[in-house]
Amino acid sequence: MPRHAIHLGTAWNPPDHGSPAWRRWFGRPAGIEPGNRLLLVCTGVRASDPWRHTALNGMPLVWRATGEATLECDVTGMLIARNELVVSGGDTTALVATPIGARADLPEAWGRLSLVVVSD
């Protein structure tokens, strides 16, 4: 099955004002065909706790381990034109120097997050 990955690791709104939530907005990929599956895949995970508190468009996500340091969540049918992914929890002490309103990368220990389109 061919797979196409769209990296979502950059352009996150980091927590501010004591909130533990990271927020990332993204659009529904163009060219999605009936029968395609859409997966959120996180590779290189060294700290998985933040992923236990994740929501897509207000709906809680359930992750499963699919390999060493890899988490996956099927979001087929959950994406709309404009999507909000919220990750809560984890250590935010490294963000002291991040200006309010600035975009940031996720903490490295959380791994690399991608939206993966799987074609039949």
Image: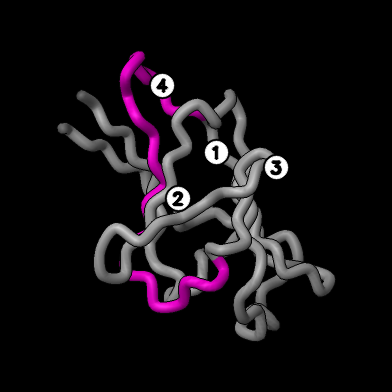
Picture coordinates of residue 25 (x, y %)? 60, 42
Q: Nearer the viewer, mark 4 or mark 3?
A: 3
Q: Quadrant of residue 23?
A: bottom right
Residue type at numbered disc 2: Leu
Picture coordinates of residue 28 (x, y %)? 50, 28
Dot 1 or dot 2, earlier in sequence: 2
Residue type at numbered disc 3: Gly
Dot 3 or dot 1, earlier in sequence: 1
Question: In the image shown, does 94 or 3 lie closer to the viewer?
Answer: 3
Q: Note whether 87 is above or below 29 in the view shown.
A: below
Q: Mark 1: few, some, or many residues within 10 Å (few <14, many ≥20)?
A: some
Residue that appears at 66% across and 64% down:
88
User: Mark 3 and mark 2: span between their CA atoms?
Assistant: 18 Å
User: Mark 4 and mark 2: span between their CA atoms?
Assistant: 16 Å
- Total numbered labels: 4
Q: Which residues are magenta?
A: 28-50
Q: Quadrant of residue 109?
A: bottom left
User: Mark 1 and mark 2: span between their CA atoms?
Assistant: 8 Å
Element marked by disc 4: loop
Q: Note whether 104 is above or below 90 in the view shown.
A: above
Residues at circles 4 and 2 in contact by the CB criterion of under 8 Å: no
> Magenta stretch: dominant SS?
loop
**Can residue 6 be found in the magenta stretch?**
no
- The residue that disc 3 covers is 58
Residue that appears at 34% across and 40% down:
116
Residues at circles 1 and 2 in contact by the CB criterion of under 8 Å: yes
Dot 4 or dot 2, earlier in sequence: 2
Picture coordinates of residue 94 (x, y %)? 61, 83
Residue type at numbered disc 4: Ala
- The residue that disc 4 covers is 30
- The residue that disc 2 covers is 8
- The residue that disc 1 covers is 26
